[in-house]
């Protein structure tokens, strides 16, 4: 290998190492978790509890402070980040001081410190504070019983992750404080003995009567009369005015429940064949319950058909609630027990291993009964079906082992964090599927780019369609625009203790970063910058519209153009250096990215930000992708590690650059040197050069080949005609 090439590779490797090390030390001055005493002097007690006059001293053992009205304690103040993880989108905690009454009701909450970029330089903080103010009056007793899902979540568009973290931290920390202080009758969580285990050796078959008799199958029977009485007790006149039709003694719903992962129960109710299918369906650690129902009211409803979730039932165990989705559901025809009643609804539900559910502990299935009281309005009641696996199905209790309380707390916190991001991923299943399809299509396009670019017109409209999806779906709809701020958050997380939880909170951003990491090895930065970046798509689409209206297009002289390239690297390095001093300050200066204005907030923002973003787009009407070429710090950040890409997919002729300049002239971002080389740092992989590579109308090499083929065919045709004429003129043997 030539010495120059070796030195180049060494420089690239060294640059990549320096870049990785730099990210690992970024955020060295990131804010650490604070204590309650730092914030209380800045808060008026009346903001947390109406009529309060002072705060008492902070308890050194349990970081709460009494809230006083005169000498009377009217509540307790606490800092959410002292009790649960509150890491937000920025990778740093969101600190909220909240107050709880002696009856375990949140009386107020105040946002005291955060580093969320979308709030710092995008969405007005007043909107977030208004959402937090809405938690006043929330009954934590109901939240503890309902697993934290007994209230409506007020989401702010563009700040979904931040709001969900705030909601999760307020509810979980509030319940922990209430339990620890014994407020509202909530008992403290004690360290429990090792969980019991199901006796898998017991497999005796029993009939329906035996199973219902010993509690293996539990029943909830509600009549029409009982339902009407229950709605009447609510005092809701609209609900009372619409009673269920039928005799009072008629069955409204006959609901039955059993844990079928206990072999004796499962084989008895399902039969050997279905029980074997169940074993194959369940992964390690998963449990399953059987739910049957009959009567005019369905426990399944129709919500799972529209949205994939069973909204009429949920499983509750302790402070945890589990809702079921269509992927966790299987329908059965009938029960295997010959003496069982006929049930129109016989269904299996799978409980994930990471749900924190134990089949050996008591739990309840909560049924939601709804009654229409208007065109769209409904009234609701809940009924509980209690269940406990009979002792006969359990192994003897093991000798109690000492379990460290801190370990249990750590485990519960990890489970809660995991549950939060899993909830977000489940809620965005459709968006994840669409993004996955887009990434799949783009990957196939790159792998088969020669075939994809064979028809110039078809490829043009394919690219315009893909860019439209990137702008509308990834950008304006899903708010999943990547940003250099993401890299700053990564640097801060690496310094303060890396955790996947913060990055998993936004599934579309997480998936895109993984896709970008893979694409950097194969194609460089262009896979994202040229196809998936919503702001890049907005620039190119607006430029194409300008071209349609005959707007002039300007290409900067090569010397000036080449000297403007380093601007984006200087901006990135400046932001990176600033982040070493103050990440919040660096995030503010990262507003050099117009992404939040144009994509996340859709230009609904203070006028200076809108003017800046619109100015860049207007320049882009005449200089295609002006911002991408010269100013984008994210593009610069991706270009640095992209130097280590493993493959060079773009085809070139030896004539490219000398003498042919067609590709260089038509490159939309002037990434091709006059000498013919493609600069991988600037290339956005638009594949325009690959369209030209096969063009019989523009590429001189292809044109020459086509002319040669035409001449060869003409010569062959002429020779054939000459031979045929010669043969036709030759006298036959008979004539001679």
Image (cartoon, grey):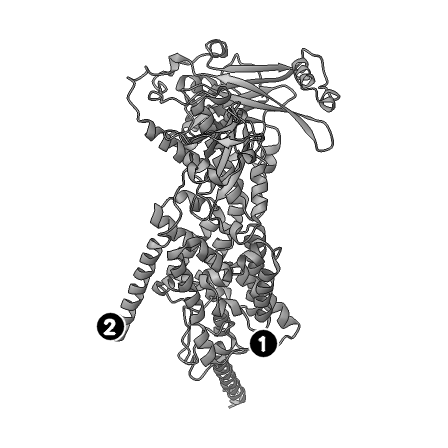
405, above or below 204, in the image = below
* Outermost residue toward the front in this view: 70
Q: Which mark is residue 118?
A: none
Name which quarter of the figure residue 413 lies in.
top left
Tell me: residue 396, above or below residue 109. above
404 left or right of 126 in image: left
How far across and down, in percent of the image, does residue 137 sit? 58, 30
Foreground pick, 119 / 62: 62
Residue at image position (30%, 18%) is 400
Tell me: 407 left or right of 320.
left
Residue 306: x %, y % from top left? 61, 37
Element type at mark 2: loop
Q: Is residue 90 above or below residue 464?
A: above
Give the residue pinned by disc 2: 1
Local secondary structure at mark 1: loop
On the image, which quarter does residue 573 sit in?
Answer: bottom left
Give residue 553's mark.
1
Tally the marks. Answer: 2
Please tell me how crowded label 2 is: few (under 14), some (14-19), or many (20+) other residues with Cα within 10 Å. few
Image coordinates for residue 542, horizontal then vertical, percent:
60, 66
Position of residue 259 measured from the top left corner of the image (x, y, whole percent): 45, 20
Q: Report if residue 634 is visible in the image.
A: yes
Residue at the image point whose x is 58% and y is 76% from the top: 553
- Give the alpha-carbon distance from disc 2 to disc 1, as whole Å: 43 Å
């Amino acid at each position: 290998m030539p010495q120059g090439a070796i030195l180049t590779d060494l420089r690239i490797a060294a640059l990549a190492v320096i870049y990785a090390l730099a990210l690992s030390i970024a955020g060295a001055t990131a804010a650490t978790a604070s204590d309650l005493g730092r914030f209380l002097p800045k808060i008026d007690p009346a903001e947390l509890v109406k009529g309060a006059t002072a705060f008492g001293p902070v308890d050194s053992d349990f970081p709460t402070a009494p809230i006083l009205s005169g000498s009377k304690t009217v509540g307790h103040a606490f800092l959410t980040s002292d009790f649960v993880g509150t890491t937000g989108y920025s990778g740093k905690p969101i600190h909220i001081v909240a107050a709880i009454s002696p009856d375990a009701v949140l009386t107020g909450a105040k946002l005291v410190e955060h580093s969320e970029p979308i709030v710092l330089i995008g969405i007005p903080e007043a909107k977030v504070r208004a959402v937090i103010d809405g938690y006043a009056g929330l009954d934590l007793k109901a939240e503890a019983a309902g697993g934290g899902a007994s209230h409506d979540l007020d989401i702010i568009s563009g700040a979904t992750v931040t709001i969900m973290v705030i909601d999760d931290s307020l509810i979980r920390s509030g319940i922990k404080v209430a339990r620890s202080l014994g407020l509202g009758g909530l008992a403290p969580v004690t360290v429990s003995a090792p969980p019991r285990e199901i006796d898998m050796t017991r497999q005796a078959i029993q009939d329906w009567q035996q199973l219902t008799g010993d509690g293996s199958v539990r029943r909830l029977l509600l009549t029409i009369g009982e339902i009407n009485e229950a709605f009447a007790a609510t005092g809701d006149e609209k609900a009372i005015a619409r009673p269920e039709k039928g005799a009072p003694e008629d069955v409204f719903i006959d609901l039955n429940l059993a844990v079928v992962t206990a072999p004796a129960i499962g084989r008895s109710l399902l039969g050997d064949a279905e029980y074997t299918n169940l074993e194959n369906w369940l992964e390690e650690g998963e449990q399953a319950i059987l739910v049957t129902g009959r009567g005019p009211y369905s426990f399944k409803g129709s919500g799972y058909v529209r949205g994939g979730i069973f909204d009429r039932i949920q499983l509750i165990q302790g402070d945890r609630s589990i809702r079921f989705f269509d992927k966790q559901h299987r329908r059965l025809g009938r029960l295997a027990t010959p003496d069982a009643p006929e049930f129109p609804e016989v269904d299996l539900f799978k409980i994930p291993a990471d749900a924190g559910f134990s089949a050996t502990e008591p739990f309840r299935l909560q049924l939601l009964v709804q009654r229409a009281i208007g065109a769209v309005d409904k009234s609701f009641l809940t009924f509980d079906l209690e269940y406990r696996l009979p002792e006969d199905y359990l192994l003897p209790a093991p000798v109690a082992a000492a379990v460290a309380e801190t370990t249990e707390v750590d485990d519960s916190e990890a489970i809660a964090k995991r549950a939060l991001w899993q909830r977000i991923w489940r809620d965005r299943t459709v968006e994840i599927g669409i993004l996955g399809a887009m990434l799949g299509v783009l990957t196939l396009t790159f792998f088969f780019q020669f075939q994809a670019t064979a028809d110039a017109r078809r490829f043009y409209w394919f690219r315009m369609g893909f860019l439209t999806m990137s702008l509308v779906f990834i950008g304006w709809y899903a708010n999943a625009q990547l940003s250099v701020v993401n890299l700053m958050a990564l640097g801060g997380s690496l310094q303060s203790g890396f955790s996947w939880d913060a990055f998993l909170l936004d599934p579309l951003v997480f998936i895109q970063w993984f896709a970008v990491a893979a694409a950097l090895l194969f194609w460089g930065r262009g896979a994202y910058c040229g196809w998936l970046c919503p702001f890049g798509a907005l620039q190119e689409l607006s430029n194409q519209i300008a071209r349609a209206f005959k707007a002039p297009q300007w290409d900067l002289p090569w010397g000036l153009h080449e000297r403007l390239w380093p601007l984006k690297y200087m901006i990135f390095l400046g932001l990176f250096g600033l982040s070493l001093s103050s990440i919040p300050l660096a995030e503010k200066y990262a507003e050099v990215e117009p992404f939040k204005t144009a994509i996340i907030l859709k230009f609904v923002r203070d006028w200076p930000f809108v003017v800046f973003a619109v100015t860049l787009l207007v320049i882009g009407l005449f200089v295609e992708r002006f911002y991408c070429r010269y100013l984008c710090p994210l593009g610069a950040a991706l270009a640095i590690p992209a130097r280590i890409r493993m493959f060079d997919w773009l085809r070139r002729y030896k004539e490219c650059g000398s003498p042919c300049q067609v590709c260089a002239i038509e490159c939309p971002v002037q990434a091709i040197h006059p000498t013919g080389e493609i600069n991988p740092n600037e290339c956005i992989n638009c594949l325009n050069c690959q369209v030209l590579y096969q063009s019989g109308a523009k590429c001189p090499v292809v044109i020459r080949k086509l002319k040669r083929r035409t001449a060869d065919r003409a010569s062959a045709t002429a020779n054939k005609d000459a031979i045929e004429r010669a043969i036709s003129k030759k006298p036959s043997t008979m004539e001679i």
